[in-house]
Image (cartoon, grey):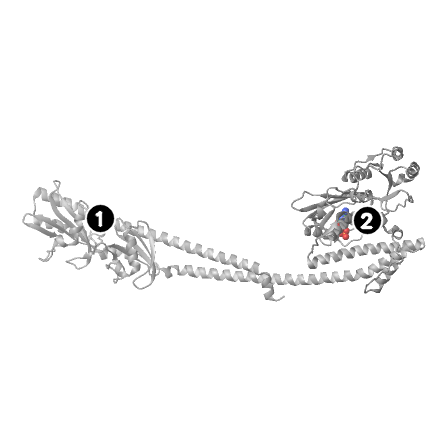
């Protein structure tokens, strides 16, 4: 078998393995990516939290300074009146303090723009005197201070006049207790310094922080701080559609931590995280996407690679194993066909041996010779049954089992089986009882040969493994489902029984149990294996109960169809009156069962004399008597000219010699009894010992065709 063939045979399995691996890889990758993202988000959140707290702290500090200064200035103003020098000195002091504070976060000026009777005065802590063209009313801080009265406000970043740097101003409009206006107090902060800490975050592989806030142009956002000067301070929507979209999102007011993927100033894709801080700005951090995921990608690559290698190795092993198995299957098949061939070949000469011994047995020969040839015949029969089993078995092996579906008569099949088994029991002190339920349809649809073989195998075993006692065959109808019939066969014997621990392997091929004890019994250990596979093929099963040393019960179930009409056994006449005499209780029990199955309730005589008087009384249509008492009643029956038809129930080898009375073979059961009561010739007329009287056709012209001369000779002799 070539590789491609093996793969084609196993493609389902291989595909499943590949599918499972692919699924595993995809799920693992998804899991790893989601884990990495989660980790990254957590990290970003933590960093932004810290940064925000620091920023808040600094802004609050400036705010506190602003309010404190405002308070002092208003107090001074109210208590001591306005003194420009004193005020300037006070602001200078604060300026010095703030400039040298180690927490200085970009502070570079404090100023007061206040109304005086002589006009507005601008006093700055850094001693800056505004030039004449400086118009305070047009500065950003002037508008910001009035945006939220009574609160400090931060302007959007703008270019500060004096230093020319990017700055924001925290401004507060001062009001006295009576609502009088004390102008605006402002603190200038350098944006560059303010943003420095955000930019100073240490990230792996090129990460950076940024701040987004309102730009000076109304209603627009810009990067207040950004590591690349090409972007810092510019309105976001001027930076491309991705940034414009981000601006839109920010304007809708995103509170929680969010992220977007966009290209930065160097056209590198970055993952940008951002969150809103309390002064309404957005603080964020970004890092190059590929850099961050680099390790993850490497891990995933290694994982996928090892997954694929593992999958290929697994597939390789499966293909290899399957190749071995297919090869051994092929060899097994070859062996089985050889076995089938050989068995078939053996059967042909064996049939000649059997045929010839039969011919010799029919001749007038001396008792000695008769006995010797009988032994040849019996041994041949045993050999034939073994060979038949082997043939069946090898057929099962080669073709699987092919089920036929033809109409057949249950009764004739059972009759065949009973005749074969009865002959096998000849001379053995084993009674054979058969009980076929009366509610089973006469004609069945199915595989007669297999059902027959199944029964023969079970009954043959019962015969082989039972030395004394009885064998019972029960045929029952199981609960019907759909239009099929469940047939139950049970074969009970009082044989050697089977050990409990052996029951499990009973139905395996070539199993023979208890070898020492059974060494004298022929068999190949195939009978039950064949029976079991037939049962299975016929939609049923087989089971066994056994007590070691006491006996066994095999129960087989098969499904068969119901033939035309589906009628059960019918008698030609109804209301038959029957009397029986049998004093062995088991025999009587089965005899009554047979009658009951046909709807007849016979009278059972308690002793011979009452049976004889019943015969003479003339009240019965039929009378059945055990062969042991035949001699005693036939004469009385003949003398009384009784209208009853008398039948002697005979054991196999019983030759009654009463030509006037009828003779029926035991076991008697519903089918055979129906034949007798309906006047159909019984099986006893076909039995081997009486064949020669049954059929004569001296003028018949017969054509016999066979390619074996021995077969032709056997046929010729038998017909002669
Ligand atoms: P065999 O050809 O040896 O009879 P089977 O497959 O028919 O092969 O039976 C397998 C074994 O099961 C027999 O060898 C025998 O030991 C045991 N066995 C089968 N039927 C019976 C039975 N009715 N009573 C006791 N043992 C049985």
* Dot 2 alpha-carbon crowd within 10 angstroms: few under 14, some 14 to 19, many 20 or more: some
Marker disc for residue 61 = 1
Q: Quadrant of residue 284?
A: bottom left
Whether residue 512 is visible here, answered yes or no, is: no
| Residue lying at 54% horizontally and 62% vertically, measured from the top left | 312
- Cβ–Cβ under 8 Å for marks 1 and 2: no
**Closer to the camera in the image, 161 or 475:** 475
Q: Quadrant of residue 237?
A: bottom left
Q: Would the CB of label 2 be found within 8 Å of ligand 1? A: no
* Dot 1 alpha-carbon crowd within 10 angstroms: few under 14, some 14 to 19, many 20 or more: some
**Closer to the camera in the image, 400 or 98:** 400
**Closer to the camera in the image, 216 or 298:** 216
Marker disc for residue 13 = none
| Residue lying at 44% horizontally and 55% vertically, measured from the top left | 30
Q: Nearer the viewer, mark 1 or mark 2?
A: 2
Marker disc for residue 419 = 2
Quadrant in which the N terminus appears: bottom right
User: Residue 627, percent across and down?
Assistant: 88, 41
**Is residue 457 toward the left or the right of residue 177 in the image?**
right
**Closer to the camera in the image, 433 or 208:** 433
When the figure is inspected, residue 268 is found, relative to residue 87, above or below; the finding is below
Quadrant in which the C terminus appears: bottom right
Whether residue 18 is visible here, answered yes or no, is: yes
User: Residue 223, percent across and down?
Assistant: 26, 57
User: Residue 149, percent across and down?
Assistant: 17, 45
Name the residue at the right extreme.
366
Return the disc, 1 or 2, that comes first in the chain's sequence: 1
Disc 1 versus disc 2: distance between alpha carbons?
A: 117 Å
Element under disc 1? helix
**Is residue 232 toward the left or the right of residue 369 in the image?**
left
User: Residue 121, percent across and down?
Assistant: 9, 51
**Is residue 670 toward the left or the right of residue 227 in the image?**
right
């Amino acid at each position: 078998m070539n590789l491609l063939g093996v793969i084609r045979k196993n493609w389902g399995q291989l595909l499943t393995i590949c599918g499972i691996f692919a699924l595993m890889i995809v799920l693992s990758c998804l899991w790893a990516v989601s884990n990495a993202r989660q980790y990254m988000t957590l990290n970003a959140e933590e960093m932004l939290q810290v940064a925000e707290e620091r920023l808040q702290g600094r802004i609050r500090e400036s705010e506190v300074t602003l309010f404190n200064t405002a308070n002092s200035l208003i107090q001074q103003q109210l208590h001591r009146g306005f003194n420009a020098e004193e005020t300037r000195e006070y602001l200078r002091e604060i300026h010095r303090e703030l400039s040298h504070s180690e927490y200085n976060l970009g502070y570079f000026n404090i100023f007061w723009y206040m109304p005086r009777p002589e006009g507005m005065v601008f006093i700055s802590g850094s001693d800056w005197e505004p030039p004449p063209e400086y118009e305070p009313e047009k500065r950003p801080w002037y508008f910001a201070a009035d945006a939220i009265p009574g609160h400090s406000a931060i302007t959007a970043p703008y270019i500060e006049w004096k230093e020319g740097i990017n700055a924001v101003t925290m401004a507060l409009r001062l009001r006295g207790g009576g609502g009088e206006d004390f102008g605006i107090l402002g603190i200038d902060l350098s944006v560059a310094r303010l943003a420095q800490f955000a930019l100073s975050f240490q990230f792996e592989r090129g990460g950076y922080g940024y701040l987004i806030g309102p730009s000076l142009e109304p209603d627009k956002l810009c990067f207040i701080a950004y590591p690349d000067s090409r972007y810092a301070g510019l309105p976001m929507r001027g930076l491309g559609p991705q940034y414009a979209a981000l601006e839109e999102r920010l304007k809708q007011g995103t509170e929680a931590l969010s992220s977007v993927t966009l290209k930065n100033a160097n056209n590198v894709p970055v993952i940008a995280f951002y969150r809103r801080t309390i002064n309404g700005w957005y603080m964020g951090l970004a890092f190059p996407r590929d850099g961050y995921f680099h390790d993850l990608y490497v891990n995933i690559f290694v994982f996928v690679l090892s997954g694929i290698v593992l999958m290929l190795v697994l597939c390789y092993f499966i293909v290899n194993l399957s190749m071995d198995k297919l090869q051994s299957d092929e060899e097994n098949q070859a062996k089985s066909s050889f076995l089938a061939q050989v068995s078939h070949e053996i059967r042909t000469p064996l049939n000649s041996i059997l045929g010839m011994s039969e011919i010799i047995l029919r001749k007038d020969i001396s008792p000695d010779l008769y006995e010797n040839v009988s032994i040849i015949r019996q041994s041949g029969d045993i050999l034939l049954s073994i060979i038949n089993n082997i043939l069946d078995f090898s057929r099962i092996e080669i073709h699987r089992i092919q089920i036929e579906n033809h109409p057949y008569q249950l009764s004739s099949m059972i009759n065949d089986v009973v005749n074969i088994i009865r002959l096998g029991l000849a001379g053995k002190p084993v009674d054979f009882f058969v009980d076929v339920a009366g509610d089973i349809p006469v004609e069945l649809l199915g595989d007669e040969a297999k059902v027959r073989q199944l029964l023969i195998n079970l009954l043959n075993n019962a015969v082989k493994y039972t030395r004394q006692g009885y064998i019972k065959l029960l045929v029952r109808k199981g609960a019907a489902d759909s239009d099929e019939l469940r047939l139950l066969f049970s074969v009970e014997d009082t044989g050697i029984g089977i050990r409990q621990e052996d029951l499990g392997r009973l139905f395996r091929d070539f199993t023979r149990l208890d070898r020492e004890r059974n060494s004298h019994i022929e068999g190949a250990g195939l009978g039950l294996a064949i029976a079991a596979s037939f049962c299975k093929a016929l939609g049923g099963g087989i089971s066994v109960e056994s007590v070691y040393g006491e006996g066994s019960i095999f129960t087989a179930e098969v499904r068969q169809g119901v033939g035309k009409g589906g009628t059960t056994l019918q008698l030609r006449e109804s209301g038959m009156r029957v009397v029986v005499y049998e004093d062995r209780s088991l025999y009587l029990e089965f005899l009554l069962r047979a009658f009951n199955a046909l709807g007849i309730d016979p009278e059972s005589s308690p002793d011979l004399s009452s049976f004889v008087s019943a015969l003479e009384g003339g009240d019965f249509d039929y009378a059945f008597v055990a062969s042991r008492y035949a001699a005693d009643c036939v004469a009385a029956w003949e003398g009384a000219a009784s209208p009853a038809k008398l039948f002697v129930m005979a054991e196999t080898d019983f030759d009654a010699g009463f030509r006037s009375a009828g003779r029926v073979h035991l076991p008697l059961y519903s089918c055979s009894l129906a034949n007798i009561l309906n006047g159909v010739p019984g099986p006893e007329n076909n039995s081997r010992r009486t064949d020669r009287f049954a059929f004569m056709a001296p003028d018949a012209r017969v054509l016999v065709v066979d390619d074996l001369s021995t077969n032709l000779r056997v046929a010729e002799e038998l017909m002669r």
